[in-house]
Image (cartoon, grey):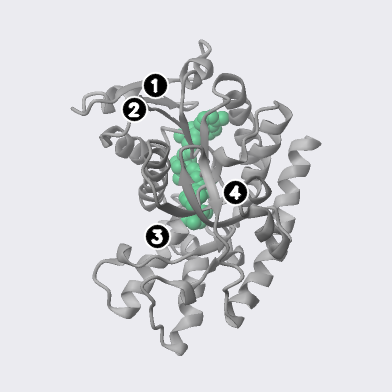
Amino acid sequence: MVKACVAGASGGIGQPLSLLLKSSSLIDELSLYDVVNTPGVAADLSHISTPATVTGYLPKDDGMKQAFTGVDIFVIPAGIPRKPGMTRDDLFKINAGIVRDLVKGVAEYAPKAFILVISNPVNSTVPIAAEVLKAAGVFDPKKLFGVTTLDVVRAETFVASIVGEKNPAKTTIPVIGGHSGETIVPLFSQANPSVSIPADKLDALVNRVQFGGDEVVKAKDGAGSATLSMAYAGFRFAEKVIKAVKGEKGIVEPSFVYLPGVSGGEHIAKITGVDFFSVPIELGASGAEQAIDVVSGANEYEKKLLEAAYTGLKGNVAKGIEFAQNPP
Ligand code: NAD
Ligand code: LMR
């Protein structure tokens, strides 16, 4: 039996993500939590003729406790999205506290659950979540994931349009680092099957993956950021975690994790100089079972990108840890 909870379920990501989870045969119970509208979203989804039972909760009447108790996997897209001209870091002021308080609830009501953090800035909200779990004495680094799958999805899509591949998902591309601008590093040299990108198109391709989020923010013109592609990506990652926990072998997907807490990760953290970092993760029954070192194999061009990513990430991670340890 798998019970999933979406925290931030009434939002632009939360609703389509909840729809995908409700449609999945892997889910038995779906619990929706938000500060608004969850009774309506839950009533709507509950009419879909799939097995998962759906319940919706608001903070009142001990709603968090009811929504979170017994949950196996949380997906958290709660928090405000960007508007044109904003960076993800501009969301920190509001979203840091939202993620902290939700993860406090997870630590209290479902301390053994897998936690998938979507809320931005991921580079800081995941370290905040780790600190909250540590303070509660329930931190298992194998179970905490920053969702960077949208960067992978974008890399697959954008490279396919350049090399003329009709099915973008056929190519595996490690996208590593963090989830904002220059901290996002696609390693096209390690694509599988290999891809041949014309030299004059590489800079623009890398830039498009790094700033794909801005492309959507601009196009939405004040109405928010990526929601539908993010729901797809969040579901894709959640589905992989659940399948791995149920025993399926050989599932690998990049995710932003606390490297020293994952087998193989300490070695990678020594190379990068950052403890929180996204690399391809082999998923298994206990969650993040193995961090795969694709950093060592980066070519000279990619190593330069990585240097910029390390610098940005160090600041973002430190900011999250400071917020959690010494609340303003
Ligand atoms: P949205 O404003 O449409 O939805 C956010 C939802 O969170 C709202 O329904 C709101 O009521 C809810 N919420 C706010 N405070 C809450 C709390 N304390 N508890 C529970 N729910 C709460 O925003 P969105 O477009 O769905 O984006 C959500 C977040 O996801 C943003 O921070 C955005 O930047 C981020 N995001 C991340 C990625 C990624 O790749 N990781 C991609 C896209 C968006
Ligand atoms: C994205 O990559 O689309 C998200 O992180 C949302 C954003 O602010 O760009």
Which residue is at the far right?
A: 326
Nearest-to-viewer mark from 3 and 1: 3
User: Identity of the amino acid at label 1?
Assistant: Gly
C-alpha span from label 2 to label 1 = 7 Å
Residue 277, image quadrant: bottom right
Q: Which of marks 1 and 4 is nearer the N terminus?
A: 1
Q: Earlier in the sequence, mark 4 or mark 2?
A: 2
C-alpha span from label 1 to label 4 = 29 Å
Name the one closer to the observer, 85 or 244.
244
Some atom of ligand 1 lies within 8 Å of the CB belonging to the residue at label 1: no
Image quadrant in which the N terminus is located: top left
C-alpha span from label 4 to label 2 = 31 Å
User: Identity of the amino acid at label 4?
Assistant: Val
**Which residue is the site of mark 3?**
153
Whether residue 227 sits left or right of residue 78 in the image: it is left
Q: Earlier in the sequence, mark 2 or mark 1?
A: 2
